Image: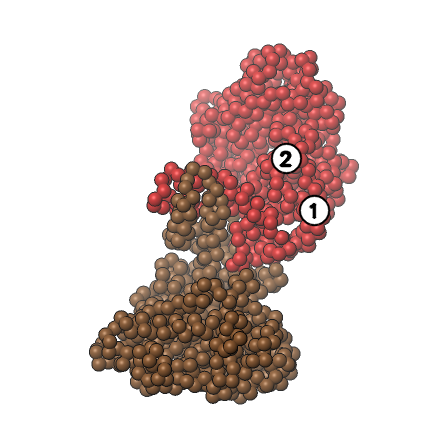
Chain colours: A brown, B red
Amino acid sequence: MAQGSDRLIIGIDYGTDSVRCLVVGASDGKELATEVAPYKRWKAGKYSDPASNRFRQHPLDYIESLQAAVTGALAKLPKSAGGRVAAIGIDTTGSTPCAVDRSGTPLALTKGFEENPNAMFVLWKDHTAVKEAERVNSVSRGWGGTDFTKYAGGVYSSEWFWSKILHVLSEDPKVRARAFSWVEHCDWMPALLTGTTDPLTMKRSRCAAGHKALWHAEWGGLPPDEFLVRVDPRLRGLRERLYSESQTSDKSAGGLTGEWAKKLGLKAGIPVAVGAFDAHMGAVGGGITEKTLLKIMGTSTCDMMIADERSVGSKCIAGICGQVDGSIVPGMVGLEAGQSAFGDVYAWFRELLCWPLQAVAPSARGLPKAGIAALGSDVGSRLLDALAEAAEKIDPAQSSVIALDWLNGRRTPFADQTLKGAIAGLTLGSSAPRVYRALVEATAYGSRAIIEQFKAQGVGVSEIIAMGGVAKKGGFVMRVTADVLGMPIKVAASEQCVALGAGIFGAVAAGIYPSVREAQKKMASGYDAKYVPDRKRAALYNSLYKRYLDLGGRLEPFLRAL
Amino acid sequence: MAQGSDRLIIGIDYGTDSVRCLVVGASDGKELATEVAPYKRWKAGKYSDPASNRFRQHPLDYIESLQAAVTGALAKLPKSAGGRVAAIGIDTTGSTPCAVDRSGTPLALTKGFEENPNAMFVLWKDHTAVKEAERVNSVSRGWGGTDFTKYAGGVYSSEWFWSKILHVLSEDPKVRARAFSWVEHCDWMPALLTGTTDPLTMKRSRCAAGHKALWHAEWGGLPPDEFLVRVDPRLRGLRERLYSESQTSDKSAGGLTGEWAKKLGLKAGIPVAVGAFDAHMGAVGGGITEKTLLKIMGTSTCDMMIADERSVGSKCIAGICGQVDGSIVPGMVGLEAGQSAFGDVYAWFRELLCWPLQAVAPSARGLPKAGIAALGSDVGSRLLDALAEAAEKIDPAQSSVIALDWLNGRRTPFADQTLKGAIAGLTLGSSAPRVYRALVEATAYGSRAIIEQFKAQGVGVSEIIAMGGVAKKGGFVMRVTADVLGMPIKVAASEQCVALGAGIFGAVAAGIYPSVREAQKKMASGYDAKYVPDRKRAALYNSLYKRYLDLGGRLEPFLRAL
């Protein structure tokens, strides 16, 4: 129990639209208070252009929202609470890099760059660097020596560090002239709070470095200058101004500065853990252990595992997005897989079915426009539940409809963003619930393909823990997924596993626990639901899964070329 | 011009739900009056069971509706009109066979069988005889000698004559004991009106015999008793009580009886042409000539062609449903192809998109139930137009979505009812109009595949005439179809081409014209719309069509096995 004398830990979770501050008890992880603060400029639509997939965030959004979230959360607790906070852990989205000057200050905070999107953080989902990613990949493939992408799944993404840096450097000579170095959002926040922003000594996140910047101990850190110059001469010399070491998040980045202690209502000097990405810290908050697949199920999925260094060693796990020593739990190899679309597949179908209500109904006569709009929004919000209710009654053995879940490409196994979705076996009797069931089965088959790939690579999966919006919503999707996986799925009880995971790292960085594993035992989330597969349906899905693989095999080259 | 002294012709078109009587001028085919009369028992849902695909029609429905339609049409004309009618032509659906007694009377008109569905006409779309069709096919394949299905596309259907007869004989011992012979609806109507119903001498329709009963001159008529007995011993001896000769519809079945002349308000003795199926007479009404593909576009399509006997001879046109000497135009080989679903594909998508309005909206709060129901029906009726409007703006070169149109199996080329539909290339941005466009393109690709098959078999297509609901509605679907086919499509002006075709046969049977071709020149429908392909889009679709073939080739075995 978090008593009045107990130490508290703050977990900070920077999401896509807002930051969350969670205050937990250090001894038991009990969630005592939380506050979410949106990014104001982002919310106003500034600096981004969805039509061209450009998404930028201003550093002031991060600073202002942090202060609001922390003071807001503490305001819900007794006045003494601020003084009892013993550590801070921080996670962010990523790869979300930003150009900084010699002092480690994001250029958008310096004169003349205040309104320049290229001087801001390039958000994880920004897709402006497609060309640059292709360049990294083509050089990588033509490169005689080491394949620097081999621990990152073999394909470098437009969403990642070097692609984004190169895109900004190519597009914006002013930023190019002024940028001394670059930071990830999860590097910069702890550095800012601890006054350690010098780019040459700033503690760099192992998680970001390993998964997004091609950092690996095998080649002594980042890829050599020679490689980067081959990608583009504009990268010449940058490696020297970045880093060669990276840190796991059980380490402290430094002590909270007096200035920030005052702003946040905390004690100066308390440790701030080295940052990491949300999914990775979330996996820790959700209770990841060896042989446990931690599945974060939302619009897409992140499928996280950790493996013993000795069993994986320097072996490449084929077909998986990334493997980085210590990116999730220090001392273990963090493995990251995922599905490019999960809940998004259902959302696509919902939008498809709502088209008449949006495009046709408003011109109907005899009913008030406002009433139709209300009806449309009401139907839209209840549609997936209604589809699930009807789909649940369909016997999967009796339906000919089968789908491929690659509507947003495929992340794992074997990343290929050029793939697309498909629905096959349609008859004139294929109703909306039947198609919906096929889509849900398809996303479950996609989940299974990841597990099969882990297994084929010698990484056993004996347990599944799910978190994220789709998992918490539960019901039909989770039942089908359990049936298709043929394994029980436990759902993490906490609604805030990610911030909780950040808090766990804070507690370890503060020395309250000797290791992440020990901290997890006391602080990580429990489970509030368990989906056990139906034996008969699991057996059926065992054979239907082969049909999914067959369909995928037949269509892969075709879909790639569309 | 049909002057007061001009002779008139009556065309009778028995459809699925009603019969149409059309009165036209003999000299110019001008449509003077028409009347449609529904089948009362059928409309009341009697004798059929849609859940088990059993569809039966009572002969009294045909008799009563005929009288209502003819007298109704004549009532719209001057009193003298009935006396000026010089001939009657009749078409019906098919294969729609019925058991008759020794006198040629359908059993349902005899004592003790009045309410027995097995004693009634087995409607074309009745699918109760699936097992029996399999039996015909398996015997046919194991048969050492002639392949009796070779002019019927090589696969015998559950919708056809022998399958249906065998199904009724197997299921109903009472009908088996009483049935002397069997008639097609299009055999029986002219026989009834002319008092020539003796089954042993009744004029049998070449069209029905050739397309549905495996009749061919090559083997002297119907398949030999030996073959039929191999299919099922219950067929023993039936061939003797059916027919060995069949007639084209330019021949008269006899003169109108005094009794029927009185009932209909016509002169006794006027000739009634031998009957045929609706699509075949419709093709004549629409203006079919050599090298003209006559495409009847509705829920499904019938694609009719005629070819010179000398050029086709006894050669089998591979992959086409049927080829019968004289089934469309006497002296020419009638070729029948078609798509199992055309408008039905769009109707499927409309139903899919309307699911929320039917299943979810009615439980919404704050709007009156009646209002929501009205909205649902309003949206449903306007939906395809709205989709077309939005889909027309999509550049086919920019869309990755591509579909297979086999949602109801594939009739031509190479009939396979086990095939199913598919939609491939879906992304999260694939909107309803985008999917709709892909479905419309798919049905057009299906049309093109038929034309390519005709061409590959040496049957050139230089012109396309379209008729039927989809063609008359016109617009987007017709523009896309013209672009995909790369040929102009003319649309028959008459809304009643089928009854008009029946009238043309009546006029020829009466000797008013020496041949169907000559009668067509004066009487057949003109054209009221022409869709000319856009040169650029036609070129694009030339290559996208190859993509459709590629997709089909990859998926065929997979879809078949679902």
Q: Is residue A179 visible?
A: yes
Mark 2, Cα crowd under 10 Å, few <14 / some 14-19 / many 20+, is: many
Q: Determine the chain carrying the residue at label 2.
A: B
Q: Is residue A217 above or below residue B353?
A: below
Query: Image quadrant for the N terminus of chain B?
Result: top right
Q: Is residue B131 above or below residue A235?
A: above
Residue extending furthest toward the left: A4
Task: Identify which residue is drawn at 45% across, 66% down.
Answer: A42
**A69 or B386: nearer the viewer:** A69
Q: What residue is disc 1 on?
A: B534
Q: Determine the chain carrying the residue at label 1.
A: B
**A547 or A230: nearer the viewer:** A230
Q: Amino acid at mark 1?
A: Asp
User: Can you tell which mark lies on residue B467?
Assistant: 2
Residue extending furthest toward the right: B310
Q: Secondary structure at mark 1?
A: loop
* Residue B194: x %, y % from top left: 61, 18
* Residue A381: x %, y % from top left: 39, 53
**B463 or A99: nearer the viewer:** A99
Mark 1, Cα crowd under 10 Å, few <14 / some 14-19 / many 20+, is: some
Q: Is residue B184 visible?
A: no
Q: Secondary structure at mark 2?
A: strand
Is residue A412 toward the left or the right of residue A18 in the image? Answer: right
Q: Nearer the viewer, mark 1 or mark 2?
A: 1
Task: Identify which residue is drawn at 33% across, 74% down.
Answer: A70
Task: Identify which residue is drawn at 75% across, 23% down.
Answer: B514
Task: Identify which residue is drawn at 58% across, 65% down.
Answer: A418
> Which of pointers 1 and 2 lies earlier in the amino acid sequence?
2
Q: Is residue B323 above or below residue A507?
A: above
